[in-house]
Amino acid sequence: MLKIISSVFLILLLIPFSQVFSAEFIDNPSTLSVSFSNNTPFVYLDSDGYTVVVGIVENNNSLTSIDNVRIQASFFDDFNSDPLEVVVGNSTLDVIPPDGKSPYVIRSQTPNPNITQAYVSPKIIFDSSSGKETEFVVYSSEVSWDTLFRFSGVLQNGDSQNSNTNIYLAFYDEFEPPRILSVSTIELGDVESNAEVIFDIDEKINVNSKGFLMFAESNIFNSNVVDVTLPSTQSLTKLVTISDVVVKDSLGNNLSEIELGSIVNIESKTWIQFAVDQSTNETPYTYYVQIKESGKLPYVEYIGKYDGQFIGTGLQSQTIEWIPKNSGLFFIETFVWDRDNVPISEKGQFVLIYVK
């Protein structure tokens, strides 16, 4: 029966989950329509083992706002046609303006390891709304991304006092169109009229994030939507960072030149920022050392490797033994690849060593 469902609805296989997307919509009343955006919902396991579905819902009417938007997600295993769980969630925005969009985030009721597929219902329930005035202005003042995402911004209020004020950051990836990967909420609560409020956030985010959409909403106001691209010089384009590459003798002394035929150790540290397989929290990897002669036509003197595995995030050290067979000036390169030979780190810094 599940195979029949799979043939009717497009199931997009993304390890470790399957995701279902439909562009159907429901009219309520007939002059209004709401649909899912033309992108694939993102499904992942959170740190507590719950399955989370993230996507975008659109208000297709150019004149009327909608509220009370409810979206149904069904969670399946690989063997049964009946869902393990059915959860009804709401859009992130309480009121979606005309021609507007809102993310939604729906979490399974339990941390069930048997869940392998998630289906988002094409039937969206909603009500028409009087809408909210766009009297908030939000903008970013500082953003950085190294081991953590750090962000500061400003909200400017209009002429009325607000309550239940929230800032939302919806992180997206490089897909075309982009997928929403997660939504972070900054709760500001009450905001006085004509006030200017500084807010900030400091947290881990999905390593595949390219940027985020920032917007605000309160009991009476909403804001413009600001698209912030993460700085390319600080984006975590790779999972692993290689550092502190050194050559040492058997006593642990750092060396800049070594004797021909002597045994030395090439040591370095690697730091992983995000587990590839969040269901197991494990990241198998292969650490490579390549040693080349310095010159116009360098030849490869030596290639060594070390197979390891990260559990979660953190720091590891690698040591590879080398016995030089030729004299001269050499440079050492280091790499970390996954078991499919895909680089998961930037190349480590060059290290020069003289063999005499």
Image (spheres, grey):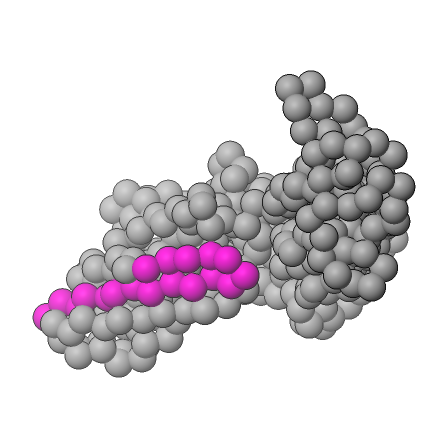
User: How many marks on residues?
Assistant: 0
Whether residue 255 sits left or right of residue 128 in the image: it is: right
- Magenta segment's dominant SS is strand
Question: Can I make out residue 111 in this image?
Answer: yes
Compared with residue 92, is residue 348 higher up or lower down, i.e. above or below? above
From what the image shows, is residue 34 above or below residue 131?
Answer: above
- Where is residue 204, by image quadrant? bottom right
Nearer-the-camera pick, 320 or 7: 320
For residue 252, side relative to residue 200 (left or right): right
Please say if 20 is above or below 170: above
Q: Which span of residues is magenta-colored?
A: 142-159
Q: Position of residue 321 (x, y in %)?
A: 86, 49
Q: Residue furthest top?
A: 297
148 within the magenta span: yes
Q: Position of residue 288 (x, y in %)?
A: 78, 42
Q: Nearer the viewer, residue 294 or 142?
A: 294
Residue at 62%, 65% (x, y): give it: 107
Q: Is residue 3 magenta?
A: no
Question: Would residue 274 be seen by someone viewing this image from the given angle?
Answer: no
Percent position of residue 165, x then y = 31, 73
Q: Nearer the viewer, residue 260 or 194?
A: 260
Residue positioned 38% across, 63% down in the render = 151
| Residue at image point 41% right, 47% down | 231
The x, y position of residue 140, in whole percent, is 29, 58
Which quarter of the rendered picture does the C terminus lie within? Answer: top right
Could you tell me which residue is drawn at 64 percent across and 19 percent down? 296
In depth, the one of 115 and 98 nearer the eye is 115
